[in-house]
Amino acid sequence: MTRAATGPVQVTGEVLGVKRAGAFHHLTLVAAGVAERFRPGTFVALTVGGDLSQRLLRRTFPIYRARPTGAYGGTVEVVLATGDDGSDWLSRLGGGARLDVLGPLGRPFALPKEPVTCTLVGGGHASAPLFGLAERLRERGCAVHMVLGAATETRLFGALEARRAAKTVIVTTEDGSVGMRGSVSAVLPDLLARTSTDVVYASGPHGLLHAAAEAAEAHGAWSQTAVETDMPCGTGVCQACVLPVVGEDGVTRMVRACTEGPVFRGDRVRWRDLGTVPSGTWGAPPPAPTGGPAR
Amino acid sequence: MTRAATGPVQVTGEVLGVKRAGAFHHLTLVAAGVAERFRPGTFVALTVGGDLSQRLLRRTFPIYRARPTGAYGGTVEVVLATGDDGSDWLSRLGGGARLDVLGPLGRPFALPKEPVTCTLVGGGHASAPLFGLAERLRERGCAVHMVLGAATETRLFGALEARRAAKTVIVTTEDGSVGMRGSVSAVLPDLLARTSTDVVYASGPHGLLHAAAEAAEAHGAWSQTAVETDMPCGTGVCQACVLPVVGEDGVTRMVRACTEGPVFRGDRVRWRDLGTVPSGTWGAPPPAPTGGPAR
Amino acid sequence: MTAVDLSTSLAGVTLPNPVMTAAGCAAAGRELEPFLDVAALGGVVTRSVTLDPRAGWPPPRMVETASGVLSGTGLQGPGIGGFLATELPWLVQRQARAVVSIAGESLAEFAELARRVGNSPGVTAVEVNLGWPEDAATGRDPYQASKVVNVVRRDVPRGIPVLAKLAPVVHSVVDVTRAVVKAGADGVVLAHTVPGMAIDRRTLRPALGGVTGGLSGPAVHALAVRCVWEVHQALPDVCVVGVGGVRTGYDALELLLAGASAVQVGTMIFHDPSSPARIVAELEAELSQRNLTRVADVVGRAHRPEGELS
Amino acid sequence: MTAVDLSTSLAGVTLPNPVMTAAGCAAAGRELEPFLDVAALGGVVTRSVTLDPRAGWPPPRMVETASGVLSGTGLQGPGIGGFLATELPWLVQRQARAVVSIAGESLAEFAELARRVGNSPGVTAVEVNLGWPEDAATGRDPYQASKVVNVVRRDVPRGIPVLAKLAPVVHSVVDVTRAVVKAGADGVVLAHTVPGMAIDRRTLRPALGGVTGGLSGPAVHALAVRCVWEVHQALPDVCVVGVGGVRTGYDALELLLAGASAVQVGTMIFHDPSSPARIVAELEAELSQRNLTRVADVVGRAHRPEGELS
Ligand SMILES: Cc1cc2nc3c(=O)[nH]c(=O)nc-3n(C[C@H](O)[C@H](O)[C@H](O)COP(=O)(O)OP(=O)(O)OC[C@H]3O[C@@H](n4cnc5c(N)ncnc54)[C@H](O)[C@@H]3O)c2cc1C
Ligand SMILES: Cc1cc2nc3c(=O)[nH]c(=O)nc-3n(C[C@H](O)[C@H](O)[C@H](O)COP(=O)(O)OP(=O)(O)OC[C@H]3O[C@@H](n4cnc5c(N)ncnc54)[C@H](O)[C@@H]3O)c2cc1C
Ligand SMILES: Cc1cc2nc3c(=O)[nH]c(=O)nc-3n(C[C@H](O)[C@H](O)[C@H](O)COP(=O)(O)O)c2cc1C
Ligand SMILES: Cc1cc2nc3c(=O)[nH]c(=O)nc-3n(C[C@H](O)[C@H](O)[C@H](O)COP(=O)(O)O)c2cc1C
Ligand code: FES
Ligand code: FES
């Protein structure tokens, strides 16, 4: 049901197809209205398990590509990792399968008004949302450089596409199976300096985001980080996706990754305190957990 | 896992196909070992809902056909009615889908040793198990007559096949859309007399079974009735499928339809007392239900 | 299709239909705006409002279970000040029927919350969260529960019902209901989540930041039906709101048949943010196809002998 | 794969592995013969045996719920005479470890059941069903529960553990455990089903012949984990058997980590009669892939600070 012309819609999506992409799966859905509203960094929340599913929580995925029109109507594409039962179920779907789609959800990457120089940093399949971002940046005349990291070659996503999307592409793998051996943090400071990067955009595991934010800070660039975290509802009602973020007033608040994020300014997120409620947080400390459900 | 050469097996079945048959669906499964053990009146218990299913109870179906060999290996066929979420899910399966199959379960129809005259009475899609039965009876030289009843034409199953399977075929529908208007009980007494039936076999709703058992009794024939009832486990462990049946000793016991049945002598089942524990039943009365779960 | 009158009475206040959101599962309603019209629901129950702002428990705050979730958020929220300044006015402006859930840590806190909520315009009812804090066992112990209800009822104007929300895991939900009604509650909400726990596959330690949490969702629906049934059986004149695992119109109907005058939808909102609106439509269809014309006629109907119509 | 020692101690009796069937969910074991080897399980808990034969409640006795079932069978069974004449000898002959569940309606009945079971050869343990009858609330009330355990323990030979099976829906499962252990129980089984109810779509009346029933299956697993956790936390020396919603090897491991020395599989047997054997294999794999070599090392491990190994 759609009530606003902007903001998310809830529609029945139809699977166009699922393709393997290295260790990942690439799912294309027909979902009316989502692509039109898409901005890079936003995500979709998909139901899993089918009609008789015992899995109530949606799985959320940043949008990889969005095409408002096409032979089948508007489509959105996402990249799935396996290992979670819901994502595994999605990866086995055949064309024509239907699921409930919410999206686009969340705050997108903030785009620069000027044609500045940008470095995009992605980890594993979480690099997916960076390609749509690169396109929009290039449309605005920005110079785009890209760093893609992964544990090993099969867990790298979009390395080929990156060559089209970016001027410079650096690939790192922890096992050295392709590109440079090591993590993205080893190459970032040098790249930012070399390219005179103004804005760093990052999407990936927390460690990568933290490293990207620190490298940006050290270099004097802005950073925008898309935080990966469990999002039980994706719509802001459950309060389970919170992380400590420092506001303009200098006060730390537990904010929702799904609605206040998933994209945050990298210098605002208290990376070292993820998974905790740091003391001094607005409204903290609650009475210590007592072993009883508290609400 | 199979431990005994007779008795049921538990195997992963693969769907060969689902076809519509009037208001019903006809499901064919490849299920190694089930067909070899099949005897008419036995049933299979199928898991429903897929990998992430919230539906724990199997759905049980009498076996319609069993082919120990074939292009794909042994197959079993069942007929599904819609309306239950699990059966509906089964009816939507495509070829290649896999499910866990238990079978053949339950006691089959008892077969006569002599080449006697038999009348087979089926209601709706519950007539399914009668066709395999007719075949075995004819192999033994029995004369086979058939009565098929249903509410309306689309809820009749196997009327065409019946012409091959039986000498006499009478079809009744409650709305008169095909065959005689009315219920099978109206035609049975006359048919039994006319054909000098020795054994009545019946499969269908309780009312039909009751009528068949009474007509047989009045005519002086034996009857064998396949009782349709919810079977949460199908294997005899849950005690939820019980009905009051009179034993050889004249004592009524609550017996399990899945293991002591589903086929019972029609004169042994206390049709009027289904859904109750009649007073005088072995072990009755329990303390009156108190509103608390009792076990 | 038979036309259906969906209106119901919540302890004297008429609601256009019996489907509300459940406390803590719809924030303060605003997040649902893209997916449904909050004014078209029977009511919107806010997350439990505390006196002071609260940051809540550390994450993880929710794990998925079979047909349910286990959660412990620690009542994160802006406190009564923030709530009255922004969240309540939004609901009122949208013409939603706002049911304000309050959670205090002491009788004095409950009294102050009651006073401040009671003095605010546009409040349809007050729901007293007695399932928290667990250690004070207020929702389990008839005496504690009645003391809280007593102070709240005193400070909320007549005409605004006070509903006591109870824990389901008690000796006798009937005894607690009797006590809170005697203390002035205009109705009870049955029931809160069931205490549960899960262990993380990786750390092999409690999966939730708060160690134990509350189990909710369709998994526990049968438990909610039983609580409503027991209370309506023993105390047929008490207004009961049923909550727990409502996913479909039939689930809502089941609670009404067991004796609830209204129902709440919680966990299913996470699955489907438009579900409360869908459930209103499905409930209407369930009644219509059975030729039942009024919600009022089905409340408690499962207690009547089969075939008996009213 | 690391080799794993699956053996465990059930209040002093060694079992080859910690996976048993749950009372009332495997009849007396024989029906599972086509699907698994009963001797390869940790133990087989029989349905609760009563003194006299019982016909049980009228059907319907079971309804499906989301990821669970609601059931009330009314303890149908042949009575202790029939049980000792045919069912127990079959288990003994098959070399299964027979855990006999008993359910009496009075202290005298419990005593007689204990005496007759205790005098029979081949009994590995006795499980006292205190979740029934509900109206006597024996499984909920520490005093009632301890009286029952007391008479049973008196009549069962030393060396045969007496396990008290408790209801989960109580103020404090710890208090009840403390009471039954003081009364002589060698361990507790946590927990019985959760009282619930469903209403039939057609009749709009209670769906079960017994009106209310017990909710079981994966839906309630988190509740069982929490009960085990609480008791092990408060009483780390008490032998606990965990039961509720075990479907996979990881579910079994979760109960062990929370503090159980053994686990039982109930409702999942209806879904999959070979599941107890599958769960033994899966548990072994769960341990092996984490380089955990002994079941004994994981019992209660979730209580230890992260990273601490023993
Ligand atoms: C900005 C962003 C980027 C992301 N990038 C991607 C991506 O491109 N592709 C991708 O596959 N995933 C991505 N994720 C993660 C994705 O949303 C799911 O969290 C992920 O699919 C869950 O699987 P996992 O392998 O991460 O394992 P986990 O998150 O560890 O999941 C394991 C278990 O967690 C539970 N679980 C899973 N999802 C949820 C949930 N939403 N809420 C509560 N519990 C849950 C389940 O019980 C599951 O069994 C991203 C999330 C966000 C918001
Ligand atoms: C001998 C015999 C003959 C039968 N004939 C056929 C046949 O040929 N084809 C056919 O489709 N069905 C047949 N059945 C019935 C079949 O086994 C299922 O019971 C049936 O598919 C369930 O759907 P229903 O339409 O009968 O509705 P119901 O039985 O009324 O089912 C409605 C609800 O009951 C519950 N339910 C369903 N199955 C079970 C169960 N096993 N235990 C507990 N609760 C349950 C579910 O919650 C479901 O939503 C037969 C059963 C037996 C044993
Ligand atoms: C994430 C979450 C937060 C909740 N917060 C509150 C709360 O603040 N106050 C309250 O009284 N109940 C709270 N509840 C309980 C729900 O209102 C409801 O009683 C329970 O979830 C059962 O209903 P359901 O199965 O429809 O979710 C919360 C439940 C969940 C899952
Ligand atoms: C049909 C059924 C019958 C049961 N019978 C008994 C019983 O006779 N005695 C008993 O102590 N528990 C009985 N129980 C409870 C189970 O042993 C077990 O405690 C409960 O079902 C939770 O475990 P599960 O989720 O694995 O089923 C029964 C449960 C079911 C579903
Ligand atoms: S995922 Fe529910 S509030 Fe963010
Ligand atoms: S279906 Fe379980 S005993 Fe018959």
Image (cartoon, coloured by chain):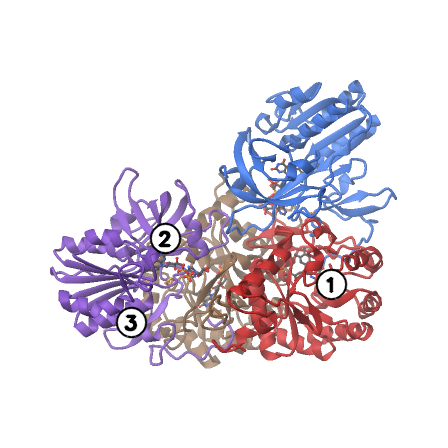
Chain colours: A purple, B blue, C brown, D red
- Does the numbered disc 2 mark a residue whose Cβ is under 8 Å from ligand 1? yes
Amino acid marked by disc 1: Arg
The first of marks 2 and 3 along the sequence is 2
Residue C238 can be seen in this image: no
Crowd around label 1: few <14 · some 14–19 · many ≥20 (10 Å): many
Q: Which mark is residue A24?
A: 2
Gap in angstroms between the C-alphas marked 1 and 3: 57 Å
Residue wearing tag 3: A269
Gap in angstroms between the C-alphas marked 2 and 1: 47 Å
The location of residue A85, given as percent across then percent down, is 46, 55
Amino acid marked by disc 3: Val
Crowd around label 3: few <14 · some 14–19 · many ≥20 (10 Å): many
Q: What secondary structure is marked by label 3?
A: loop
Q: Chain of mark 1?
A: D
Instruction: Identify the residue at horizontal 55%, vertical 45% (top origin).
Output: B48
Q: Chain of mark 2?
A: A
The location of residue D232, given as percent across then percent down, is 60, 75
Residue wearing tag 1: D97
Front label number (2 vs 3): 2
Q: What secondary structure is marked by label 1?
A: loop
Instruction: Tell me the quadrant of ligand 2.
Output: top right
Gap in angstroms between the C-alphas marked 2 and 3: 28 Å
- Residue B79: name its quadrant: top right
Whether A201 is drawn above or below C147: the answer is: above
The one nearer the camera, A84 or C194, is A84
Amino acid marked by disc 2: Phe
Q: Is residue C96 left or right of residue A134?
A: right
